[in-house]
Amino acid sequence: MGDTIHDLFLYSPRRDRIVRLSDYVTDVESRRASRVFWLISGAEWCSVTRITVQEAYALWLELRDRGVELLLSLNQDRDYGVTAEAIVAGAQRWDRDVLGDSLEDPDFLGVLADTSRLLDAYYTIAATPLNLIVGPDFTLHYAVVGWEGTEAMRATLEAIIEAEL
């Protein structure tokens, strides 16, 4: 995954800007960030994605001060003719309807739109959500399609935080 994930970009409708993992690099020489990245990508129609993002946001609130950055994104079946604009509109709907409690959180980027298509290589939209954990050196540590639950994810994240930060 290396350079590919480092180059990932997602659009934040909430902030009206592109978010790149490379923006988090704190040591330019070693291309290392000071965070562990938890990326979740799914489809607006997916009920498991809805549950996942709600539980993930709650877990992130517990772990963010320990160096975890949560990036939630919608993909929206682009291979079936859904436009980038429709993906952004879906992200805005989810930001409001699914994670409305987060709207006042200045540290949360909101639901992002996957306009880079780099995540497409790691799953098919027919099986969502995709959960990835990427270390500060942009190495993929964990990838699973589906949701294994809050406790399993907490244990995985804590082990990676302990090893990487």
Image (cartoon, grey):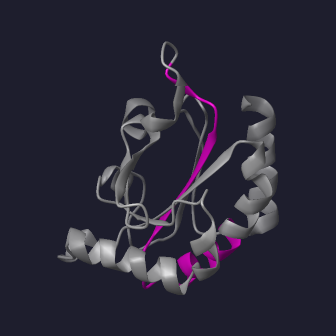
Asked whether the viewer can see residue 23, the reply is yes
**Residue 165 location (% of width, % of height):** 74, 31
In the displayed structure, 165 sits above or below 54; it is above
Q: Which residues are magenta?
A: 31-56
**Residue 6 location (% of width, % of height):** 42, 35
**Residue 141 location (% of width, % of height):** 62, 40
- Residue plotted at (58% across, 81% down): 100
**Residue 16 location (% of width, % of height):** 35, 61
- Residue plotted at (80% across, 59% down): 62
Verify whether residue 46 appears in magenta. Answer: yes
Lateral position of residue 155 relative to residue 9, left or right: right
Of residue 152 and residue 21, the one placed in the foreground of this image is 21
Asked whether the viewer can see residue 148, the reply is no
- Residue plotted at (32% across, 72% down): 88
In the displayed structure, 89 sits above or below 161; it is below
Verify whether residue 11 appears in magenta. Answer: no
Lateral position of residue 131 relative to residue 9, left or right: right
